[in-house]
């Protein structure tokens, strides 16, 4: 039963839960301040095995889909098509982004597709008693991780940077904007020995913000991430061609073609890959491998997920073998993690090695608000 008594080839009930998860410390970016994260959990129950998927959403409309937008895209048709494709998948084979080719590729639909994909994958792995890491051919038990710092004044930024370095981050990403200046960035660069990325979250304009760009390019940063709007490859390519700074893309990376275009036009040297933006785990892994084949560095980007989502990112990062990503456990940034992913230890993030894609939400801990699938 996909919903309300509707049947497909696999008898399965879908339930959607939304949880508002508070961040320990708000993270200010150029476009907004992240103080909480509303996460959608999709539960697929066939009566024997329950599979779970997670999709963190944006609080406000913008580059990523909101809860309402994802729920609007999470229709009976999407769920039915996904389950039908799962039923057609050979036994033991991994589902390959089962809904992306079946629905238009708007951000909300890609996120909904990724959510369904994750729950189906989790259900299959739990049924087989296998971990996602094992399914992806990962042989290591842990991975390195990066950290993020919001727009803050210098001393606060340094304090946060030092705490993250002490926890074992191998790279820091500090948020910047046209109004933030470079004082905090300079202070962090002076205080730590790990690479530091300046992340503008698509807030700058090539001509109007020339002085800001020049100041950032003069700093010894690892790269400047997404300075311009997501669709503006021309200005990214022009900035990269100046040779003063390595350019990274984040919000621009929404398809395999976007990765190819970034390489083709010389618009970036680094790409950030997020499964909800591409339509699922398989496509995210494909994007990272495509980036590597084209000479681009890549890393897995996070969105302040709960433990289930972070476990997926950890396995993906290990499987892709690229730069360390945003895979640290939520215990470092959420007030409470309903999925209880193991915390970082010794400068490494343990992978989830039990059945499924990650630890399932604890119903007794998670305050779930049921909503109807539209």
Image: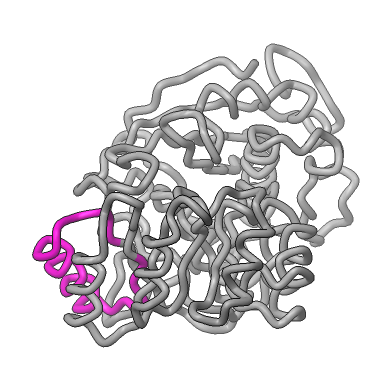
Magenta includes 268? no
Give coordinates of residue 241: x percent, y percent.
63, 76
Asked if residue 60 lies left or right of residue 104, the reply is left
Is 132 situated above or below 168?
A: above
Residue at x-position 17% and y-position 73%: 187
Magenta span of residues? 149-173
Residue at x-position 79% and y-position 45%: 98
Asked if residue 252 lies left or right of residue 333, the reply is right
Residue at x-position 84% and y-position 57%: 91
Foreground residue, 335 or 172?
172
Check the image and name the residue furthest to the bottom.
Answer: 193
Quadrant (top left/top right/bottom left/bottom right) for the N terminus:
top right
Foreground residue, 160 or 189?
189
Asked if residue 267 lies left or right of residue 174, the reply is right
Give coordinates of residue 329: x percent, y percent.
35, 61
Check the image and name the residue furthest to the top.
Answer: 4
Is 276 situated above or below 9?
A: below
Give coordinates of residue 119: x percent, y percent.
63, 43
Quadrant (top left/top right/bottom left/bottom right) for the C terminus:
top right
Is 249 situated above or below 84?
A: below
Residue at x-position 78% and y-position 16%: 6
Q: To which quarter of the image does residue 168 belong?
A: bottom left
Is 41 situated above or below 172?
A: above
Residue 308 appears in the rendering = no
Foreground residue, 132 or 248?
248
Magenta includes 151? yes
Give coordinates of residue 124: x percent, y percent.
69, 52
Check the image and name the residue furthest to the left.
Answer: 155
Total count of labels: 0
């Amino acid at each position: 039963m996909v919903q309300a008594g509707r049947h497909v080839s696999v008898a399965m009930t879908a339930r959607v839960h939304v949880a508002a998860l508070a961040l320990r410390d708000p993270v200010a970016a150029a476009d907004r301040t992240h103080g909480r994260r509303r996460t959608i959990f999709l539960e697929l129950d066939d009566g024997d095995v329950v599979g779970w998927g997670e999709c963190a959403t944006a609080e406000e409309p913008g580059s990523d889909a909101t809860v309402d937008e994802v729920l609007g895209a999470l229709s009976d048709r999407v769920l039915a098509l996904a389950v039908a494709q799962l039923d057609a998948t050979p036994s033991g084979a991994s589902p390959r982004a089962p809904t992306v080719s079946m629905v238009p590729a708007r951000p909300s639909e890609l996120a909904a597709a990724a959510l369904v994909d994750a729950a189906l994958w989790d259900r299959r792995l739990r049924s087989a008693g296998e971990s996602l890491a094992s399914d992806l051919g990962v042989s290591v038990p842990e991975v390195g991780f990066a950290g993020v710092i919001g727009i803050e004044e210098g001393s606060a930024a340094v304090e946060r940077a030092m705490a993250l370095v002490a926890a074992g981050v191998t790279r820091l990403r500090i948020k910047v904007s046209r109004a933030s200046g470079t004082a905090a960035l300079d202070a962090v660069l002076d205080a730590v020995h790990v690479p530091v990325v300046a992340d503008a979250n698509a807030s700058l304009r090539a001509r109007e913000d020339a002085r800001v760009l020049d100041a950032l390019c003069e700093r010894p940063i690892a790269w400047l991430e997404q300075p311009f709007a997501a669709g503006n490859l021309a200005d990214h390519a022009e900035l990269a061609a100046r040779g003063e700074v390595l350019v990274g893309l984040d919000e621009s990376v929404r398809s395999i073609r976007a990765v190819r275009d970034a390489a083709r036009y010389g618009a970036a040297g680094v790409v950030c890959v997020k499964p909800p933006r591409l339509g699922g785990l398989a496509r995210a892994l494909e994007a990272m491998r495509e980036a590597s084949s084209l000479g681009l560095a890549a890393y897995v980007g996070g969105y302040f997920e709960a433990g289930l989502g972070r476990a997926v990112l950890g396995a993906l990062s290990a499987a892709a073998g690229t730069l360390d990503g945003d895979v640290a456990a939520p215990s470092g940034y959420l007030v409470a993690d309903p999925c209880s992913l193991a915390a970082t230890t010794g400068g490494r993030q343990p992978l989830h090695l039990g059945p499924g894609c990650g630890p399932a939400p604890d119903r007794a801990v998670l305050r779930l608000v049921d909503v109807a699938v539209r």
